[in-house]
Image (spheres, rainbow, N blue to C red):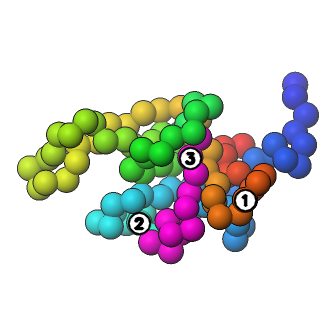
Amino acid sequence: MTEETPETAPVTAGADVPPDHLSVNPRSPFFDGEKLQRGVGIRFKDRVRTDIEEYSISEGWVRVQAGKALDRKGQPLTIKLTGPVEAWYEDLGENPPIAKKG
């Protein structure tokens, strides 16, 4: 069993922690422009990703664009990838609180 230090303990709520579910698509009910303007960093499967369209920390998935393909409404096609997701606000500098599934 590993011991969690304050730096590695999962954080699930607070003003400086991104929401559990967030999308960059303005049509989505999970879109929040204010939070996106702060800059949200995403780590998926121990790799920092910048191509995430939507994520859910509690459900453990991200959506990424599938190439240049578009659906019939002109929106990019996305695929859902499952795995551990961590999120943080990039405007907080070094060692920000990280939201992850506990």
Q: Which residue occupies 62% across, 44% down?
A: 86
Whole-number angstrom distance, CA of label 3 to CA of label 1: 14 Å
Give residue 26's position: percent from left, percent from top.
Answer: 32, 67
Magenta-colored span: 33-43
Q: Is residue 13 visible?
A: no
Give residue 45's position: percent from left, percent from top.
Answer: 57, 30
Dot in front, 3 or 2: 3
Mark closer to the chain start, 3 or 2: 2
Q: Nearer the viewer, residue 47 or 13?
A: 47
Q: Which residue occupies 29% across, 66% down?
A: 27
Can residue 95 be found in the magenta stretch? no
Relative to residue 93, is residue 32 drawn left or right?
left
Please tell me how crowded label 3 is: few (under 14), some (14-19), or many (20+) other residues with Cα within 10 Å: many
Q: Is residue 101 visible?
A: yes
The N terminus sits in image quarter: top right
Mark closer to the chain start, 1 or 2: 2
Can residue 40 be found in the magenta stretch? yes
Circle 1 is placed at which residue position? Answer: 93
Q: Nearer the viewer, residue 15 or 12?
A: 15
Mark closer to the chain start, 3 or 1: 3
User: Decide: marks 1, 2 in contact (CB < 8 A)?
Assistant: no
Mark 1, secondary structure of its residue: loop
Mark 2, secondary structure of its residue: loop
Give residue 69's position: percent from left, percent from top.
Answer: 17, 40
Relative to residue 36, is residue 19 drawn left or right?
right
| Label disc, if present, on residue 31 of the rendered structure | 2
Whole-number angstrom distance, CA of label 1 to CA of label 2: 24 Å
* Quadrant housing residue 23: bottom left
* Quadrant housing residue 64: top left
Callout 2, which amino acid?
Phe
Callout 3, which amino acid?
Ile
